[in-house]
Every structure is written in structure tokens, then in C-alpha cells.
């Protein structure tokens, strides 16, 4: 298995632009998580899905952030408009079944820089 | 906050020595997990210890959990240069019926050859 796939790996954009991050979870996994990692705040859970349905989005910082999971093999995290404080590494992770919180498999991350 | 706090923030030791990292948390948990993150990479799950367990081993890793002190430790024995990474504890708990997995800030471990 290729593991969790994220694209792009690096994104540099200007303030105000729309940013879309993409994630392909491990085939067969039914939970998908989006995290953000910064030096100041560490690793924060933004949102997670179960069977493509958003379950907990309490970590989404504000309305500029939105996430979708149109099918079991694809999810997007969109920031519109982007701001410099959104600069961070964004990770997608997936897991399977009842052990969803027992072991999460992380993607390599997308390093976002907003100028 | 429920977030686990690792101690120390950074640790530098010689290859072959043992490395011990600690994690403290604030409320009841279902389990506690340790993850490793190599520079520029995603996190990798290392080991999970349930709230009713006190010690667990996996290869050169030994994890202990003291629920009375709300603390856990991760011991890496006979360290190797490849163990250089950041190590995070993550606490799994329920709050208002919702599951949460909250990561600490991590310990940066450097193994010097």
C-alpha cells in the first residue's frame, strides 16, 4: 500500500489566495483526519470524517477553512482567503474501524507558506 | 487543557545510551499513545498503552503508565542514530460523548554518534 498520499507537498501562495490541499487515505480506512502543525501550537486536529461524513469540526479555526470528503478515497481542505497565520504543515491521517483512535497513519504533510 | 505535556522538550544523548521521555496529562484517558516524527515527515505510531495497563514493551521501546500520577514514560534502550526524531505522546479520551486524541508538544531527541 502506498500509505496516505497528500498533495501538494509544498505550497507557497500570497495572502488572499485560495488554497486547496488534497488527501488520499489508505484504501479501506474509514476514518480520515486533518491536522495542522506549527511550532507555536503543536499538532492540532482540525476535523475528522467517518465514512465520508464530517464528525467533529470543532478544531476548524474559522469559516475560511472548509473540508470535504466526496468519496472514500479523497478529501480536500480548503482555505479561502488564506492569511500568513495559516502558514503551517497540514497533515492528513487515516485509520480503520473501531481502532480508529488506536493507530492513525499519517501522510507526509503539505507545507503551506502564505506570504 | 487535556493536552499531554512532554518533558524534556529536547534531549541529546550518545549512541548506545538509554533515552527517557515523559508525558503528563490532566484528566482520565482511555489510552495513551506514542508517535515518532522524523524531520519533514508525518507521524508514525509506535506503541499504545491502555488505561488499565502499567507497562508495555515493543522491541527497544518500553512504555509505562501511572494513572494515579497521570503520567507516562517512553524509554528507548540502546539508542541508535536512527532514533533521532521528535516523539509525541497522544492521549485518547472522551469528552461530552466525543472521542478526542490530543497530541503533546513533543520531545526532540538527538542521538550523537
Image (cartoon, rainbow, N blue to C red):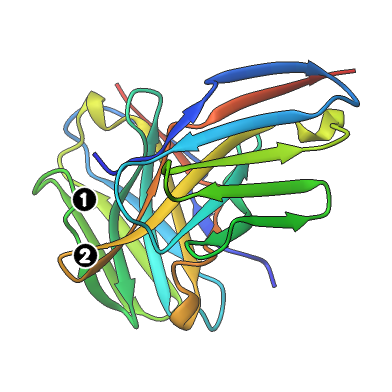
Residue at horizontal 20 percent and vertical 36 percent from the top: A82
Q: Are marks 1 and 2 on the same chain?
A: yes
Would you say the residues marked 1 and 2 are in contact, meaning their CB atoms lie under 8 Å apart? Answer: yes
Could you tell me which secondary element the residue under label 1 belongs to? loop
Q: Position of residue A96 (x, y in %)?
A: 50, 78
- Picture residue at 66% right of the left edge, 36% below the top: B38
Label 2 marks which chain's residue? A
Residue B39 seen anywhere in this rendered image of the structure: no
- Crowding around mark 1 (Cα neighbors within 10 Å: few <14, some 14 to 19, many 20+) is some
Residue B16 drawn above or below residue B42: above
Q: Position of residue A78 (x, y in %)?
A: 25, 52
Q: Is residue B57 left or right of residue B106?
A: right
- The residue at 23%/39% (across/down) is B1
Residue B110's disc is none
Furthest toward the left, the residue is A63
Q: In this image, B106 relative to B36: left or right? A: left
Q: Is residue B1 left or right of residue B76?
A: left
Q: Which residue is mark 2?
A: A56
Chain letter of mark 1 equals A
Secondary structure state at the residue bearing disc 2: strand
Residue named by callout 1: A59
The alpha-carbon separation of the residues under discs 1 and 2 comes to: 8 Å
B53 lies above or below B15: below
Q: Quadrant of residue B5?
A: top left
Q: Is residue A59 visible?
A: yes
Residue B105 vs B102, above or below: the answer is: above
Q: Where is residue A10 drawn, in percent x and y?
A: 49, 37
Which quadrant is home to the C terminus of chain A? top left
Q: Position of residue A13 (x, y in %)?
A: 32, 31
Q: Residue at x 44, y 51 (%)?
A: B67
Instruction: Work out whether residue A16 or residue A2 is closer to the camera in this orientation and state it.
Output: A2
Amino acid at each position: 500500500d502506498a500509505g496516505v498520499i497528500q498533495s501538494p507537498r509544498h505550497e507557497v501562495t500570497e495572502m488572499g489566495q485560495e488554497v486547496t490541499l488534497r488527501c488520499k487515505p489508505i484504501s479501506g480506512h474509514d476514518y480520515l483526519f486533518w491536522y495542522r502543525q506549527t511550532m507555536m501550537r503543536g499538532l492540532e486536529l482540525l476535523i475528522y470524517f467517518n465514512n465520508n461524513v464530517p464528525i467533529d469540526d470543532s478544531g476548524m479555526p474559522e469559516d475560511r477553512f472548509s473540508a470535504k470528503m466526496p468519496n472514500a478515497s479523497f478529501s480536500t481542505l480548503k482555505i479561502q482567503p488564506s492569511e500568513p497565520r495559516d502558514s503551517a504543515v497540514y497533515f492528513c491521517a487515516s485509520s480503520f474501524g473501531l481502532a480508529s483512535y488506536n493507530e492513525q497513519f499519517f501522510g507526509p504533510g503539505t507545507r503551506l507558506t502564505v506570504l | 487543557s487535556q493536552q499531554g505535556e512532554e518533558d524534556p522538550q529536547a534531549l541529546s544523548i550518545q549512541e548506545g545510551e538509554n533515552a527517557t521521555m515523559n508525558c503528563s496529562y490532566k484528566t482520565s484517558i482511555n489510552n495513551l499513545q506514542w508517535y515518532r516524527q522524523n524531520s519533514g515527515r508525518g507521524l508514525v505510531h509506535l506503541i499504545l498503552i491502555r488505561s488499565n495497563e502499567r507497562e508495555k514493551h515493543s522491541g527497544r521501546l518500553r512504555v509505562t503508565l501511572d494513572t494515579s500520577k497521570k503520567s507516562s514514560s517512553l524509554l528507548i534502550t540502546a539508542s541508535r542514530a536512527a532514533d533521532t526524531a521528535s516523539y509525541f505522546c497522544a492521549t485518547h479520551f472522551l469528552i461530552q460523548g466525543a472521542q478526542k486524541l490530543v497530541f503533546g508538544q513533543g520531545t526532540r531527541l538527538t542521538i550523537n554518534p
